[in-house]
Image (cartoon, rainbow, N blue to C red):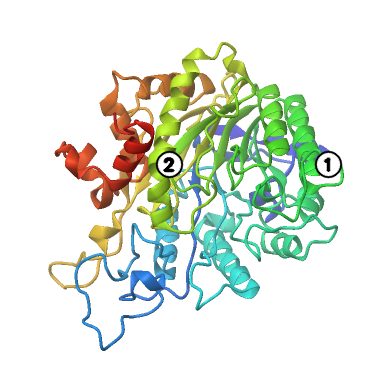
Amino acid sequence: MKIDYFLWALLLVSGSLSMPSLLQQQPFVTNQQVNVTVHGRYLHITDIHMDKHYLKGATIASDCHREPNKHKKRKKRQGLLAGYWGAPNTDCDSPPRLVYHNIEYIANEWKNKIDFVIWTGDNARHDGDALITRTKKEIIGYNQKVTRLLKKAFTLDGDRTLPIVPCIGNNDVHPHNALRGIKHNPQLEEFSVLWQDFIPSDQMKSFKKGGYFAIDVVPGLRVLSLNTLYFFSSNDVVGSCHDPTSPGHRHIKWMRSQLKRARRDNVKVIIIGHVPPTVKTFKDSCLDDYIRLSTKFADVITGHMYGHANMDHFQIIGTTMSSSSIMSGLDQEKESAVEIYKDAGRFISTLKRQYRKVKKIRHTEDLVVVHVAPPMLPLFYPTFRINEYETNHSSSEFGNWLRYTQWYTNLTYWNEARDPMTGKRLAPQFEIEYSTDKTYNMTDLTVKSWLDFAERVSSKNEKQLWRTYLRNMFVQTSNQWYEQSIIDNRPSSTRPWWSWLLELVTGINPFA
């Protein structure tokens, strides 16, 4: 789709719109019309977790940092030692070679087919190895590397860079989770320099103050990049969002003013952040305010896009749902794959019950649908998501979320793949995991469509759809831990160990 940018240029000059990074990096021509193709697609990547200490052949127990002791018999069975491209289904983070390859691969395939990139945080490795603790310098280094990689990879012809919209993850600060609301926060100052090409100049003041900003990525479509660390229940150095002196309170105030402005400007908004809003992850006051704003401006907001929680799913929150029925998700981001698996049964069971409650809600306009994308980190298999939106400006549906396609790469296969002729190692290729229109039969991704899907996928008559949803939730890594029970239709004796515990305690089989 071609858009006449002349009017948009006038709006930019007048200050009615914020200038996206692609226009900041070049003088914007206002005395002639500029034809730019709008594709109606954007990329979502999250939770990269680069680890410079990753070592091929290292033990999983060492977080893939150290080789087995030489005096011990070397274990050769697949999966017990770190693979070349990564160690899926373990606690290990991403080897740099995987990060470099993935970003280059995605950019080569998609940079000329998308309009912008949303990048929802956590570029640094986890702090799980007591022998190699993270330092502030190391964390800054990871953020610098990933920023440079993305900027270079998504540079188009003529040195024009696609708009890249980042946000801060809880592992991108030191110490992790903790970000103070002081007047001159040195960590926010560092990010403001690092991301100066991504943040509009008129938004830099608010970013330096609070780590959040707004940007118009295409005419009529705006992204609000939130700093969810000021809402995060694990950030003990800031107070309640109802405390007028807290950074969370200021953030909510900014969010409200931005949504009012978006409605006044007649633009649609995508909200992005790292930590998704749930009972467990947000402070109560912050969650209440987030829900109120999201429902009040539901006509403006087209989507809530997050990372952090790793499992591919959506949550439904709202003022008309009791706190016990709100999908709380995992208590917080898990540092261990084992912890995730232990919580998975409770998580899945609660999620299914919560979806079933939707049909009992009379005022669905009070509900908010929040989306969590799976990570590039090979906790399961590395992923990225291509979202599509309506580009017809003459339609009232402009900017509405239409569909997405989830892509993944099977590292279990690519760790062993070799060219049959040369014997050289092959680089991972991505393939489609699923799409919302073909796999879930969704005609669009409006709130109503997601609520309809929640009812359908949790129905007793749609067990196969629920199984498909679960496979996608864990990015097809079911062969490692629950394939036997839900994919191959093997006897129930091969169900995952935690499902037995769950059913024993609660009487609920999450796969029923």
Q: Secondary structure at mark 1?
A: loop
Does residue 239 appear to the left or right of 353 in the view shown?
right
Compared to residue 108, the image places residue 403 above or below, namely above
Q: Which residue is mark 1?
A: 243
Query: In the image shown, does 191 or 289 lie closer to the viewer?
Result: 289
- Residue type pointed to by label 2: Asp
- Where residue 241 sits, quadrant-wise, is top right
What label sits on residue 312 in the rendered view? 2
Q: Image quadrant of residue 284?
A: top right
Which mark is in front, 2 or 1?
A: 1
User: In the picture shown, does residue 61 fall above or below 275?
Assistant: below
Please, which residue is most extreme toward the front here? 505
The one nearer the camera, 228 or 387, is: 228
Q: Can you see residue 460? A: yes
Q: Position of residue 182 (x, y in %)?
A: 83, 58
In the image, farthest residue toward the top: 362
Observer able to see residue 433? no
Residue ranking furthest to the bottom = 71
Identify the residue shown where x is 43% and y is 41%.
312
Q: Residue at x 66, y 23 (%)?
A: 295
Looking at the image, is 104 positioned above or below residue 366? below
